[in-house]
Image: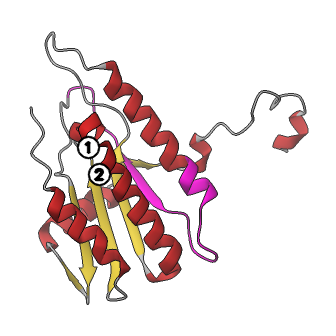
């Protein structure tokens, strides 16, 4: 299955809306493999920076739910996935986990990043990529936002990406086991 085309203009418009005080929530879904292509790295980074920046500026005034893949989808047939996709996937998870651990607005919860779990036979996520904002109590697309929020609320469909996914021990982490007590 090919990824649908990502409308860069819509993504930029919606992430720009995060600076508005009337926007109180955003749901971002980036589960398509297109996000791991080199040509979308700049847009992916732009989205990451905009969401993190909005969280830092707005604190508790903005609820952010992000959905990314927990695991890459199954590869069908002889078409092998490029190792660059695997590297981009690992790097993105590492960076998002580091940001959730190290950058948190005072008095607000850590960013909520939900990793969508694909079963072994799924070749793509069952949800489209989207960025939907809640502006003055109305979602930019209520149906799509509802679909994402339903998946987030479904027990066992996602797992959180947290700072626990980071290895911060360094080379001497096991030298003093009392640090874990």
Residue 48 location, x and y as percent?
Answer: 40, 56
Reading the image, the residue beneath label 2 is: 43
Work out whether residue 155 can be spotted: no
Q: The N terminus appears in which quarter of the rendering? A: top left
How far, Cα to Cα, is label 1 from label 2? Answer: 5 Å
Name which quarter of the figure residue 142 lies in. Answer: bottom left
| Nearer the observer, 42 or 96 | 42
Asked whether residue 69 is drawn in magenta, I would say no
For disc 1, the neighbor class at 10 Å (few under 14, some 14 to 19, many from 20) is: some
Residue 111 location, x and y as percent?
Answer: 49, 62
Q: Is residue 174 left or right of residue 82?
A: right
SS of the residue under disc 1: helix
Residue found farthest to the top: 78
Instruction: Please count the marks in the image.
Output: 2
| Nearer the observer, 20 or 176 | 20
Q: The C terminus appears in which quarter of the rendering? A: top right
Report the span colored magenta. Answer: 98-121
Q: Check contact, mark 1 vs mark 2: CB within 8 A.
A: yes
Mark number displayed over residue 40: 1
Mark number displayed over residue 181: none
Q: Is residue 1 above or below residue 137?
A: above
For the point 48% across and 71% down, which residue is it?
55
SS of the residue under disc 2: helix
């Amino acid at each position: 299955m090919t990824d649908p085309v990502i409308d860069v203009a819509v993504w930029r418009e919606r992430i720009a809306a995060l600076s508005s005080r009337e926007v109180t929530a955003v749901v971002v879904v980036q589960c398509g493999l297109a996000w791991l292509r080199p040509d979308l790295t700049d847009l992916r980074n732009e989205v990451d920076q905009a969401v993190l920046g909005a969280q830092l500026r707005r604190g508790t005034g903005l609820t952010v739910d992000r959905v990314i893949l927990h695991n890459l989808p199954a590869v069908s047939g002889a078409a092998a996935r490029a190792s660059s996709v695997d590297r981009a996937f690992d790097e993105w998870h590492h960076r998002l986990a580091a940001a959730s651990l190290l950058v948190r607005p005072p008095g607000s919860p850590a960013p909520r990043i939900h990793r969508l779990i694909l079963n072994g036979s799924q070749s793509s996520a069952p949800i489209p990529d989207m960025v939907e904002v809640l502006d003055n109590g109305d979602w930019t697309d209520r149906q799509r936002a509802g679909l994402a929020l339903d998946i987030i609320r479904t027990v066992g469909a996602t797992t959180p990406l947290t700072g626990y996914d980071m290895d911060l021990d360094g080379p001497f982490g096991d030298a003093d086991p009392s640090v874990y007590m």
